[in-house]
């Protein structure tokens, strides 16, 4: 049941907002309203956005 909910939520968010932006917004919210330090914010953003960019590039190369 949880897997179905997560899949539906993922599909909804994919249509409404990109995952990269969602991660950035989440990290920014934690930075503003929680104990997240600016160094951690940079690390979270860089790792996810960089990693997701590599995945996107590989997917496009496989399509070609």
Image: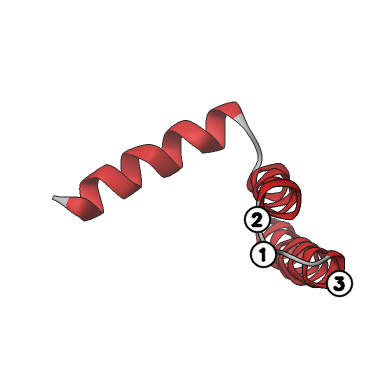
Question: What residue occupies the far top of the structure in this picture?
Answer: 16
Depth check, mark 3 against mark 1: the one in front is 3
Q: In this view, does 1 lie to the left or right of 11?
A: left
Local packing at callout 1 (Cα closer than 10 Å; few below 14, some 14-19, many 20+) is: few
Q: Quadrant of residue 43?
A: bottom right
Local packing at callout 2 (Cα closer than 10 Å; few below 14, some 14-19, many 20+) is: few
Residue 36, position in %: x, y? 71, 64
CB-based contact (under 8 Å), mark 3 and mark 1: no
Q: Name the residue under label 2.
A: 34
Residue 5, position in %: x, y? 26, 43
Residue 47, position in %: x, y? 76, 72
The secondary structure type at the circle numbered 2 is loop
Q: Residue at x 71, y 65 (%)?
A: 48
Q: Name the residue under label 3.
A: 39
Q: Residue at x 72, y 43 (%)?
A: 21
Distance from disc 2 to disc 1, alpha carbons, whole Å, reads 40 Å
Q: In this view, does 55 lie above or below 12?
A: below
Q: In this view, does 14 lie above or below 56?
A: above
Q: Nearer the viewer, residue 11 or 41?
A: 41
Mark 2 or mark 3, earlier in chain: 2
Q: Which of 5 and 44 is in front in this view?
A: 44
Distance from disc 3 to disc 1, alpha carbons, whole Å, reads 35 Å
Q: Name the residue under label 1.
A: 62
Q: Residue at x 67, y 47 (%)?
A: 33
The secondary structure type at the circle numbered 1 is helix
Distance from disc 2 to disc 3, alpha carbons, whole Å, reads 14 Å
């Amino acid at each position: 049941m949880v897997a179905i909910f997560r899949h539906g939520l993922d599909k909804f968010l994919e249509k409404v907002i990109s995952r990269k932006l969602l991660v950035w917004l989440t990290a920014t919210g934690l930075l503003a309203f929680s104990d997240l330090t600016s160094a951690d914010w940079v690390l979270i953003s860089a790792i996810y956005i960089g990693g997701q960019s590599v995945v996107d590039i590989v997917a496009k190369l496989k399509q070609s």
